[in-house]
Amino acid sequence: MSKAMNNHGSSSPTMDRPVVVIGSLNMDLVVRVPRMPAAGETLTGDGYATAPGGKGANQAVAVARMGAPVAMVGCVGRDAHGAELRAGLEADGIDTTQVRAHDDAHSGVAVIVVEATGQNRIVLAPGANALLDAVAINFAGAMIERAALVVLQLEVPLPTVLHAAKRARRVGVPVLLNAAPAVALPDDLWQAIDILVVNESEAALLAGTDVVDADSAVRAAGALRERGPATVIVTLGALGVVLVDAHGVIVQPAHAVTAIDTTAAGDTFIGAYAAARREGWSNADALSLGQAASALCVTRRGAQPSIPYRHELTGDYTPRPAGVPQPFTQGSR
């Protein structure tokens, strides 16, 4: 069990510890269309915009906007996009000392096509994100060791994700993995995950079963939990969210909103959930904060520009008193 976090309040408070996000930074190139083009079809878009994005950077921004200290570990190119991506993080108070600039790769780019319904399709050109390696993780070792939680995704090389998870595990720091984009995970990575967060398609791929509603999501989450994570969360978009852990099952409905752009909705949920859990919120309350933040996110355009600040949320989402011991239980099933 992590000495920094437990369920029993026996360890000293760690509210000064940051959430460390290790992952991708991309410049999003967004085109809006009335519908997706068919194969071979040329379709005229309704608009174009650029915005900072990348699953790692989005999640870091979401944590920061919920009021928690954050440090980012990642790679950009030594180009205009890289400078803008770093500046965007710093504007939200995020520690970028471990965001490294490379001369021999462009910054990551995501081409995002958004339909009138708000649904999107994304094509990634990872660029410098592919250069995030074990050496970079080792340089960030001191940062990882003092983290409240390490948050990972799969838009950077899988061996790097594994190395980072194991590094955190060795020093008793809990690991949240957002297994997106979904790929088969090695057994030793499964054993290093404390919290797994996936959407319905990712859960279906990893569990090898259809996920179409809350009941099937609960079954998939239970199967995934048997592989190692103490907590499995399946986000279901408009159908809500499911969580399975040692205490049972939580199913929460989504907020009823009119979505105009779902880009970064999942990242916003994860960042808000991570920030709340760091403060000592229960899983149910942390899910509620994540749901509220992601619901507001989808009513706005863009990735990071759409991520809300805590004060924008309606409801009882005020910060808990400082000094609440952290509720994570590392590796406990």
Image (cartoon, grey):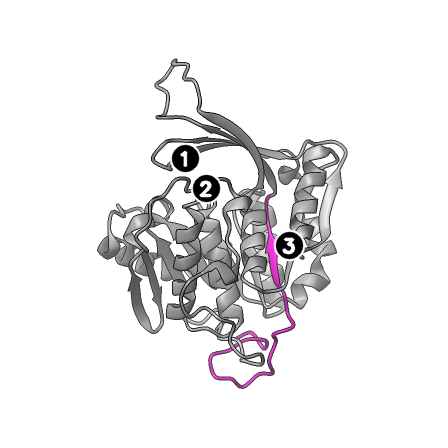
Nearest to viewer (mark 3 / mark 1): 3
Q: Amino acid at mark 1?
A: Asn
Q: Amino acid at mark 2?
A: Thr
- Asked whether the beta carbons under mark 2 and mark 1 sit within 8 Å of each other, the answer is yes
User: Between 249 and 38, which is closer to the camera in this rendering?
Assistant: 38
User: Between 319 and 200, which is closer to the camera in this rendering?
Assistant: 319
Label whose residue precedes the other's in the sequence (2 or 1): 1
Can the viewer see residue 17 in this picture?
Answer: yes
Please tell me whether mark 1 sits on a helix, a strand or a loop. strand
Can the viewer see residue 193 in this picture?
Answer: no
Classify 25 as above or below 228: above
Asked whether, in this view, residue 274 is left or right of residue 139, the answer is left
Classify 181 as above or below 277: above
Magenta span dominant secondary structure: loop
- Asked whether the beta carbons under mark 3 and mark 1 sit within 8 Å of each other, the answer is no
What residue sits right under mark 3 in the picture? 92
Asked whether, in this view, residue 155 is left or right of residue 228, the answer is right
Q: Estimate the x, y position of residue 306 in percent, counting from the top left.
A: 50, 46
Please tell me whether mark 2 sits on a helix, a strand or a loop. loop
Picture residue at 59% right of the left edge, 65% below the top: 68
Quadrant the C terminus occupies: bottom left
Magenta residues (range): 1-24
Q: Crowding at label 3, few (<14), some or many (≥20) Cα neighbours within 10 Å?
A: some
What residue sits right under mark 2 in the picture? 263
290 is within the stretch colored magenta: no
